[in-house]
């Protein structure tokens, strides 16, 4: 999801505030490259070679093993894969799909920048010979990899979890498939909730200065303004990704507004929320909300009770009791640390991509001939019966899904980590937002979309109360 528009800028290290989120990344590149350069299954003429690309450095480096684990757990649960160690980055052997050996040629170690993502993509595809790539994690990385996919029409690319709108809506690579929402889709329902439940009329937004937050905040702005809310350009604040001192940006938040939508992500979100409280006192959760990062398990562990009461939108209903949700969590059991982060969009994104790939490879009996055209045709119509709902693709190979409005609740007894209560289901969210976004509309940016009152997206007023008592996802 994430790389600053200015390019490959140096990044400062974030001080640890939680064991997992702020672990020192110094050893990760060496460990990752060792895994990247390992050929886990002997290559044969019938082998299907897969590379997996994520971030092991930068603001999202702490999600590296969750990403890899989400993908590899599918191979272990359904295709005979055997973990080579306790961590996903240790690799996996033994998997077969449609009788073909699955050769994990390596893991890409990126840092949230487009340049590094392409460097690692080229290594996996051109040097290590991956037939199929799963990844990347970060927004501008995703745009770059989608453009690269156009130069490799005989290879197949499945997005990891990157969420910049342009990667599918604008680039339109016919061999690039995204089984996760983009950032605007992930924000669906929040504009309606802010206007009609919290009674906001004026709002400010703050997000990292690059493609994913532009997309994430675009969803909120388009929906909130369509109903009658106001988010003028002066109320849109963009600190660079990697910022460690947010104080000057926090002081830019206008006084007298009804609410603040926060799209800062990764390690920066922890820092932002702590510094926000230092400057403004305790979070007033009736007047602040966040995007899909807010209910992430790692964030909840790091921030704790100050977030209780806040509302966020997410592709995950963290408290769901669907039988499919339980089955998904059980699949992740091969990696306990990844299983603990099952309710993370990072884990789910890579799980969804590998699940879709396994289904499509099975449907075509592992056929990669003729420039992988049979596989790509199968992927375009693949439907993932996900742990929180159905994931299908539109004609542009972009996910259509149900989103969720969630509220952060007090920690359960015996823990200091807040819980999640899912409030509303936002049905059938598509990338166009019911016509707000198209290949010809301006890409989300610091100033787009404009704040315009118009016919709201089709789900506004049609969100449904959550009922987990049926025991099954309402596919």
Image (cartoon, rainbow, N blue to C red):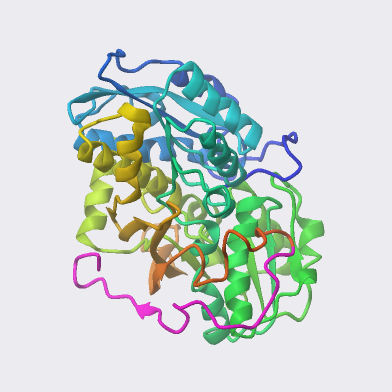
Residue 463 inside the magenta-drawn segment? yes
In the figure, 246 relative to 421: above or below?
above
Residue 401 inside the magenta-drawn segment? no
Q: Does residue 306 appear to the left or right of 393 in the view shown? A: right
Question: Looking at the picture, how far across and down is residue 292, in whole percent?
Answer: 51, 59
Which stretch is magenta? 447-475
In the figure, 225 relative to 42: above or below?
below
Kindly tell me whether residue 171 is visible in this rendering: yes
Q: Does residue 287 appear to the left or right of 93 in the view shown? A: right
Kindly tell me whether residue 333 is visible in this rendering: no
In the rendered image, which quarter is residue 283 located in?
Answer: bottom right
At 78% from the left and 59% from the top, the residue drawn is: 249
Q: Nearer the viewer, residue 424 or 333?
A: 424
Instruction: Classify the position of the C terminus by image quarter.
Output: bottom left
At 30% from the left and 12% from the top, the residue drawn is: 42
Q: Does residue 328 appear to the left or right of 267 in the view shown? A: left
């Amino acid at each position: 999801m994430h790389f600053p528009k200015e390019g490959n800028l140096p990044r400062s290290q974030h001080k640890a505030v939680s064991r997992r989120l702020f672990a020192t990344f110094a050893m990760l590149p060496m460990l990752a490259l060792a895994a990247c350069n390992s050929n886990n299954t002997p290559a044969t003429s019938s082998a299907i070679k897969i590379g997996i690309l994520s971030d092991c450095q930068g603001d999202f480096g702490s999600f590296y093993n969750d990403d890899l684990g989400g993908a590899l757990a599918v191979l272990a649960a359904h295709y005979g894969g055997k973990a080579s160690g306790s961590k996903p980055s240790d690799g996996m052997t033994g998997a077969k799909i449609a009788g073909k050996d699955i050769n994990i040629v390596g893991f890409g170690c990126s840092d949230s920048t487009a340049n590094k993502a392409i460097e690692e993509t080229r290594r996996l595809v051109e040097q290590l010979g991956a037939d199929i790539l799963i990844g990347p994690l970060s927004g501008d990385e995703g745009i770059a990899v989608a453009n690269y996919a156009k130069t490799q029409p005989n290879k197949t690319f499945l997005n990891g979890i990157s969420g910049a709108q342009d990667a599918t809506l604008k680039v339109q690579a016919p061999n690039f498939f995204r089984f996760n929402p983009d950032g605007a889709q992930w924000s669906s329902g929040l504009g309606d909730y802010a206007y009609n439940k919290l009674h906001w009329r004026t709002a400010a937004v703050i997000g990292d200065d690059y493609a994913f937050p532009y997309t994430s905040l675009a969803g909120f702005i388009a929906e909130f303004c369509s109903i009658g809310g106001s988010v003028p350009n002066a109320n849109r604040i963009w600190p660079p990704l990697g910022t460690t001192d947010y104080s000057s940006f926090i002081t830019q938040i206008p006084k007298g507004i009804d609410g603040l939508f926060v799209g800062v992500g990764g390690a920066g979100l922890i820092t932002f929320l702590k510094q926000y409280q230092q400057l403004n006192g305790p979070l007033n959760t009736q007047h602040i909300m966040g995007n899909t990062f807010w209910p992430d398990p790692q964030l909840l562990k790091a921030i704790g009770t100050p977030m209780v009461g806040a509302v966020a939108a997410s592709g995950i209903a963290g408290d769901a009791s669907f039988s499919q949700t339980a089955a998904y969590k059980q699949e992740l059991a091969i990696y306990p640390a990844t299983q603990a982060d099952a309710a993370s969009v990072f884990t789910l994104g890579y799980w969804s991509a590998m699940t879709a790939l396994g289904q499509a490879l099975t449907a075509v009996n592992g056929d990669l001939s003729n420039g992988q055209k049979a596989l790509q045709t199968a992927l375009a119509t693949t439907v993932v019966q996900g742990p929180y709902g159905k994931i299908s693709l539109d004609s542009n190979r972009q996910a259509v899904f149900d989103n969720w409005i969630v509220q952060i609740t007090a920690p359960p007894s015996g823990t200091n980590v807040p819980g999640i209560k899912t409030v509303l289901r936002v049905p059938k969210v598509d990338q166009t937002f019911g016509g707000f976004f198209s290949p010809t509309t301006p890409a989300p940016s610091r100033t787009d979309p404009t704040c315009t009152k118009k016919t709201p997206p089709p789900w506004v007023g049609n969100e449904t109360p959550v009922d987990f008592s049926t025991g099954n996802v309402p596919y």
